[in-house]
């Protein structure tokens, strides 16, 4: 039986699920409880994974440092994050994190090669991260963004550590503060994305060592990315 994602409610969730060094376009369908991935190492062949339900939001990242993205789910209602680790036969690991009003914002903030569980609070612009290099000790206190912004962390400056990027869909506005500058300097840009376009977590789509800003229109099934290796020219494809 072939299963395809429904257009309504589908959530974009890219990552390097096949470990070839390039990000793979992917979406999560909470109605069906399924992950859909176009694997770049297999000529964009469609792969699916039955996991989760409508109460969770998807997260991707390499939580076990095996060079493959691990499927993960975050529940704000339960204040819990669960990860299915690819190097352990996709065994599940979970931890308390966040809660009501907090959004998922996991990335490798300490540069140890493992994705750190993280959350972002839009009302206050506060970020909280469990750092894997410090035995998952919580770190917080950095403020970036605010009401109307969604988190899009990724290594946009190529220093090996995630930067705090936020996206405001109404105007297609992006703002980032960089780890290489001690999170003290921010830069902004507008005109990429818009009200119907959801931002994607910072993936490296051109394999140049830097995360590329990307958006997806789930209803129209259009994926667009600004490629850092091509002077941030926009490339698009139909989903």
Image (spheres, helix red, strand yellow):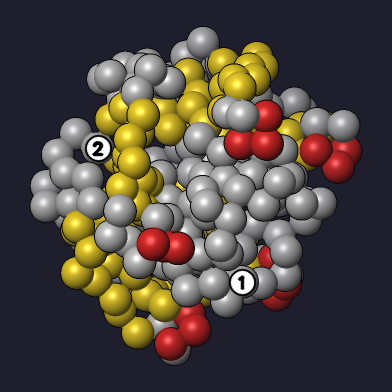
The label on residue 162 is: none
Of 40 and 52, which appears nearest the observer? 40
Above or below, comparing residue 135 to residue 80 in the picture: below
Residue drawn at the location 64% of the way across and 44% of the way down: 204
Residue drawn at the location 80% of the way across and 31% of the way down: 44
Residue closest to the far bottom = 135
Chain-order first, disc 1 or disc 2: 1
Q: Which residue is mark 1?
A: 113
State the SS at label 1: loop
In the image, taking residue 92 as reference, residue 235 lies left or right, namely right
Quarter of the image where one finds residue 85? bottom right
Residue closest to the far top = 220
Counting from the top left corner in percent of width and height, residue 105 is at 38, 55
Of 192 and 189, which appears nearest the observer? 189
Quarter of the image where one finds residue 169? top left
Q: How many marks?
A: 2
| Residue 102 visible somewhere in the drawing | no
Residue drawn at the location 18% of the way across and 51% of the way down: 125
Specify few, some or many for label 1: CA neighbours under 10 Å numbering under 14, 14-19, or 20 or more: some
In the image, taking residue 41 as reference, residue 128 lies left or right, namely left
Quarter of the image where one finds residue 98? bottom left
Counting from the top left corner in percent of width and height, residue 106 is at 43, 59
- In space, the residues marked 1 and 2 are separated at their CA atoms by 27 Å
| Residue 67 visible somewhere in the drawing | yes
In the image, taking residue 34 as reference, residue 1 lies left or right, namely right
Above or below, comparing residue 54 to residue 214 in the picture: below
Counting from the top left corner in percent of width and height, residue 209 is at 67, 52
Residue closest to the far right = 42
The label on residue 149 is: 2
């Amino acid at each position: 039986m072939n299963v395809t994602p429904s257009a309504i409610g589908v959530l974009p969730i890219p990552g390097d699920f096949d470990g070839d060094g390039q990000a793979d376009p992917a979406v999560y369908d909470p109605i069906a409880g399924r992950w859909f991935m176009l694997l770049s190492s297999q000529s964009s062949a469609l792969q699916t994974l039955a996991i989760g339900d409508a109460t969770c939001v998807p997260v991707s990242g390499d939580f076990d440092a095996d060079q493959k993205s691990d499927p993960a789910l975050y529940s704000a209602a339960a204040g819990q994050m669960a990860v299915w680790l690819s190097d352990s036969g996709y065994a599940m690991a979970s931890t308390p994190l966040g809660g009501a009003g907090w959004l998922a914002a996991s990335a490798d903030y300490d540069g140890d090669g493992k994705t750190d569980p993280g959350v972002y609070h839009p009302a206050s612009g506060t970020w909280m991260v469990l750092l894997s290099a410090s035995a998952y000790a919580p770190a917080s206190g950095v403020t970036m963004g605010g009401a109307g912004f969604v988190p899009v962390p990724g290594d946009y400056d190529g220093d090996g550590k995630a930067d705090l990027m936020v996206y405001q869909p109404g105007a297609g506005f992006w703002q980032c503060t960089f780890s290489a500058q001690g999170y003290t300097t921010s830069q902004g840009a507008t005109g990429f994305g818009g009200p119907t376009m959801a931002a994607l977590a910072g993936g490296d789509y051109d394999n140049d060592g830097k995360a590329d800003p990307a958006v997806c229109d789930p209803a129209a099934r259009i994926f667009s990315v600004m490629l850092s290796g091509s002077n941030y020219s926009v490339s698009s494809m139909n989903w």
